[in-house]
Each structure stands twice: as C-alpha cells, then as structure tokens.
Image (spheres, rainbow, N blue to C red):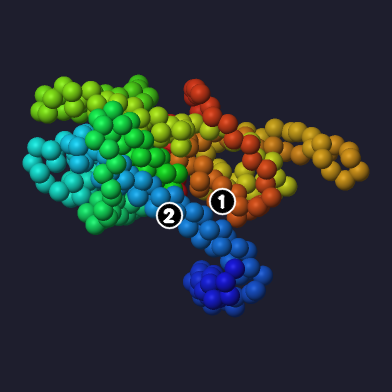
Amino acid sequence: MNPFLSKILVDIARKRIAHKRPNQPVRKREIVPLVRNLQVELAHTIKKYIFITIGIFSAGFGLKGFLLPNRFIDGGATGISLLIENITHIKLEFLLVIINLPFILLASKTINLRFAIRSIIAILFLAIVVHYVEYPIITEDKLLIAVFGGFFLGLGIGMSMRGGSVIDGTEVLAIYLSRKLSLTVGDVLLLINIIIFSFGAYILSIEVALYAILTYLAASKTVDFVVDGVEEYVGVTIISEKHEAIRLMIIEKLQRACTIYSGKGGYGAGKTSFTKDIIYTVMTRLEISKLKTEIDKIDKKAFLVMGIVKDIKGGTIKRKPLKD
C-alpha cells in the first residue's frame, strides 16, 4: 500500500485506540490488526463506489441515449419520474431526486443509515450525470429503444446494488412491504409497476405503455443477471481456521443465525484428513458484500462457497434488518 496512505491509516488506528483508552499508552501490536481492518474496509469501499459509478453512467446512458429523447417510460421510481417529465416538462434530474427521496428516508429506517446515505449520493450523482453529460441518441427504432434502454438502465440499477445502494427507490418500498405483507419482493414490484403502466396508458398512450412493459422486462432481467434479485437469499458455507471468530462476527455484528457442523478437510500435510468446523449461514444478496468485508478482516484465506437459495421458511432472515 502507498506509504502516505499507510501512515494515515496508522494515525487513524492510533487515535481510535487512544479514544477508547485515553490514559493508557498505545502499543504497536494493538495498532497492526486495526490497520489491517481499515485496509480491508478501504479496499471494499473503493470497490463499492466503482460499482456505483459504473451503474450511474450506465443508467444515464439508458435514460439520455434511449428513453428520454423518445418520450419512453420505465417502471419504478425512474418510470414515475419519466412519466411526470412527459406531462409537466420538469427536468428529469430534479424529479429523480424528489421522487426517490421518500424511498431513501424509508431505507434509513428499513435497512440502515449508511445504505440510505450511499443511495442518496448515488441518486444525486445520477441527477448530475443526466443534467451535464451529453450522451449520443443511438436509434429511433422503438423496439431497440425499449429493449436497450431497459438493458442499460437495468445494468445501472444492478451495478449500484452490487455497490450497496439503489438508484431506484421502489426496491426499498418492495422490501419493506414484503416484510409486512404475505408477498415476495417481486410481487410488490409487479403491483407497483402495473399501476405505473396503467397511468402511462391513460395519460400518454397504450402503445407507449406496451413499450414501457418491454423496457421494464429488459431492465428487470438485467438486474436479475447482475445481482440475482433484489433481496434473493444466498446460502454461504465458510471454511476457516478462525471459524470461532467468524461465528461470533456473524451473530454479534451481522445479527444473523448460523449453523456449525463438523467436517473433514481432505487437503493437508501428509495427505491425511483432519477434523474442522464448517459454518453455514443464509443471507440476502445485499448483505453479502458486508459479510465478505468482515470475513476478510478476520481471515483473508477463508474459503467461501455461495449458492442461490430458491426458497426459505422460518428462521430469523425476514425479521432482521439489513446491516452494513
């Protein structure tokens, strides 16, 4: 790591330790693990914001290169913004912020404040990109506009979610309502978008609404491809020599349940098997980034196996808020 950056991290670590124990000297052996954790956090934060930045420019391309010049709409908060822009001619960049703001406030309570802050930063950045960046108008073919406009918009939404934020707040509302009602996130999103498309058909035209459905399908399938769903469950198997520290982190820091089962390692010195504890937990896709960050702090050599869980019942998954 850059020496200047390393010095900054050491100073931060020293100040944090001194703040906790103001009357005791700070030892080097206390600074080293904290600096290591700060390095992991910094690397993961940079990675998140790279995803968000790519997502913002992709969404901006979908909006200004395809949908906006041709007066097309989409689903979600972006679709509401495009619909109002068509009716009132208020600038889209202002509508993106205004329409998403209530959803972001809900995210601060439903998920957490850090997620909400990242999301509002991403939405503000998207508004700036839409206002200032000039994208070329790619085509006037309506079918291509609907499909590829939805593709680039969905890519932007998906990449932003990979970075731990949203640029379309209806996903937050869907997560919130799915916990209150006996509906999945996909069901709630479908209901919201049926209402939006119905208004689009009434206010604009049935043809525009039909193309909007194509745009939404292209966008939603792209989001599924990028992040495997808004809040899809992921089963994580963790094999590590520091399994006890990881178990405590999952329970205390992430507030998630986990299962420990005994296994045998088949790769070791002398080509003999050896007993080890294996951790299994289930989390949502939005929580995986945080889990990886925390595991890297404890054991960078930990072996993780992740797989999509198609259905789940019981446990504490739905009752716990997303942590970050």
Does 19 sit above or below residue 300? below
Q: Is residue 180 visible?
A: no
Q: Position of residue 190 (x, y in %)?
A: 30, 24
Looking at the rendered structure, the kind of residue marked 2 is: Tyr
Q: Which mark is residue 49?
A: 2
Would you say 83 lies left or right of 104 here?
Answer: left
Which residue occupies the foreground of this view, 308 or 239?
308
Picture quadrant where residue 6 is located: bottom right
Give me the disc on residue 112: none
Q: Residues within 10 Å of mark 2 (few under 14, many from 20)?
A: some
Q: Where is residue 29, by image quadrant? A: bottom right
Residue 303 visible in the current orientation: yes
Amino acid on which the number 1 mark rests in the picture: Glu
> Image check: 5 left or right of 91?
right
Residue at 36% from the left image edge and 52% from the top image edge: 118
Q: Is residue 275 above or below residue 136?
A: above
Q: Position of residue 299 (x, y in %)?
A: 66, 52
- Tell me which residue sits at (65%, 52%) in the image: 300
For marks 2 and 1, the one nearer the N-term is 2
Q: Residues within 10 Å of mark 1 (few under 14, many from 20)?
A: many
Query: Circle 1 sits on which residue?
Result: 294
Q: Position of residue 15 (x, y in %)?
A: 50, 73
